[in-house]
Image: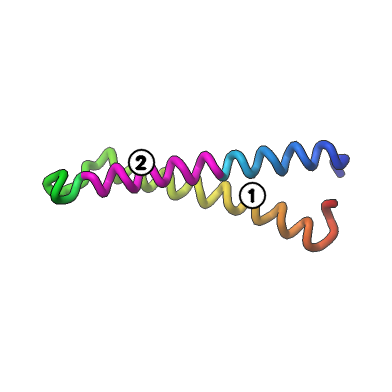
Amino acid sequence: MPNPEQQRVEEEAALEIERCAFERRQAAVFYVQRQFLPYGNGQPTEESMRELEEADASLQIARSNVDRIIQQIRTGERR
């Protein structure tokens, strides 16, 4: 089992990854929304939809990692 310092580093990294994934998804949503009226023609590009799907998947993975750490803290497996 990692020592408390290693755990802290892992926890901070997990939170930073989740924050970056959230910001990526937020940017992807805004990009898709800008393609609708009054700014666009109402048809999002394949590229923008692909980026949104990838950003969603990335955020889901990041959140599951944070959830795993939270569960370990709750069960006492992690200090």
58 sits left or right of 27 in the view: right
Amino acid type, callout 2: Glu
Amino acid type, callout 1: Asn
Does the stretch in magenta take in 29? yes
Q: For the residue carrying disc 2, how many other residues have a C-alpha within 10 Å: few (<14), some (14-19), or many (20+)?
A: some
Please report the residue visible at 84 percent of the width from the left and 56 percent of the height from the top: 77
Residue 11 percent location from the top left of the image: 71, 43
**Which corner quadrant of the image does residue 47 belong to?**
top left
Q: Which residues are magenta?
A: 19-34
- Give the vertical position of 49 relative to 75 (above or below): above
What's the magenta bit mostly, secondary-structure-wise? Answer: helix
- Say whether disc 1 or disc 2 marks the residue closer to the N-terminus: 2
Please report the residue visible at 65 percent of the width from the left and 43 percent of the height from the top: 14
Question: Which type of secondary structure does the marked residue at label 1 adopt?
Answer: helix
**Image disc number at residue 51:** 2
Q: For the residue carrying disc 1, how many other residues have a C-alpha within 10 Å: few (<14), some (14-19), or many (20+)?
A: some
What residue is disc 1 on?
Answer: 65
CA distance separating discs 1 and 2: 21 Å
Residue 61 percent location from the top left of the image: 55, 48
Residue 4 percent location from the top left of the image: 86, 42
70 sits left or right of 24 in the view: right
Does the stretch in magenta take in 44? no
Please report the residue visible at 20 percent of the width from the left and 45 percent of the height from the top: 35
